[in-house]
Amino acid sequence: MSESRHLFVYGLLTFPEIVQAVTGKQYQTQPALLREHRRYGLSQSPLSAAVPILVEETAAVTEGVLLLDVSDADFVKLDHFEEIDSGHYLRKNVRVESGGQWYSADVYVAGPILRPYACGEWLPGQVSAEQRQHFVTTVIPEMLKTI
């Protein structure tokens, strides 16, 4: 039997349609806060949409979403989506606050390749419905072929 863990998301994976396109599932979610980390935009992005990175930063708080009980099999897909093999992102374990409770969760943070490109604030509204649809219909299906 595989274990499941929680995942704190703060960027494209806050959109349920993106999570479902990557994993094939709709996960139960709840709003959450991650302390000592800040979400930035990227000054350069190879994708058709603005994407964020997360870096450790004292006194910062990042709002996001907690995906509950993510399976090991889906973490394989999510790791591929976040390109952890390339060093763009790294997955680490953190403590997040949600609904007045603390949870252990994994999170994708900026790897050494992306950190120098942290620039300004990133907000979910920077990704249009058309860009999300492009991810769901084109980018993610192509990415999943390479797993």
Image (cartoon, rainbow, N blue to C red):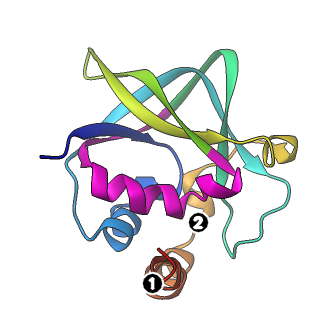
Tell me how far mark 2 sits from mark 1, CA to CA: 19 Å
Reading the image, the residue beneath label 2 is 127
Residue at 32% of width from left, 58% of height from top?
74
Reading the image, the residue beneath label 1 is 141
**Counting other residues with Cα less than 10 Å from the Cα at mark 1, is it few (<14), some (14-19), or many (20 or more)?**
few
Above-or-below relation of 147 to 92: below
Q: Residue furthest top?
A: 59
Q: How far across and how far down the image is residue 5, in percent?
A: 28, 37
**Element carrying mark 2:** loop
Residue at 56% of width from left, 58% of height from top?
125
- Say whether residue 87 is magenta: yes
> Can you tell which quarter of the image residue 47 is in?
bottom right
Above-or-below relation of 37 to 145: above
Q: How far across and how far down the image is residue 76, in percent?
A: 40, 57
Of the pair 66 and 109, the residue shown nearer to us: 109
- Say whether residue 34 is magenta: no
Check disc 1 and give the amino acid type.
Pro
> Can you tell which quarter of the image residue 120 is in?
top right
Q: How far across and how far down the image is residue 143, in percent?
A: 52, 78
Of the pair 9 and 4, the residue shown nearer to us: 4
**Counting other residues with Cα less than 10 Å from the Cα at mark 2, is it few (<14), some (14-19), or many (20 or more)?**
some
Earlier-in-chain disc, 2 versus 1: 2
Q: Is residue 43 left or right of residue 73?
A: right
Q: Is residue 121 left or right of residue 119?
A: left
Q: Which stretch did the figure color magenta?
A: 63-89
Q: Is residue 95 left or right of residue 53?
A: left
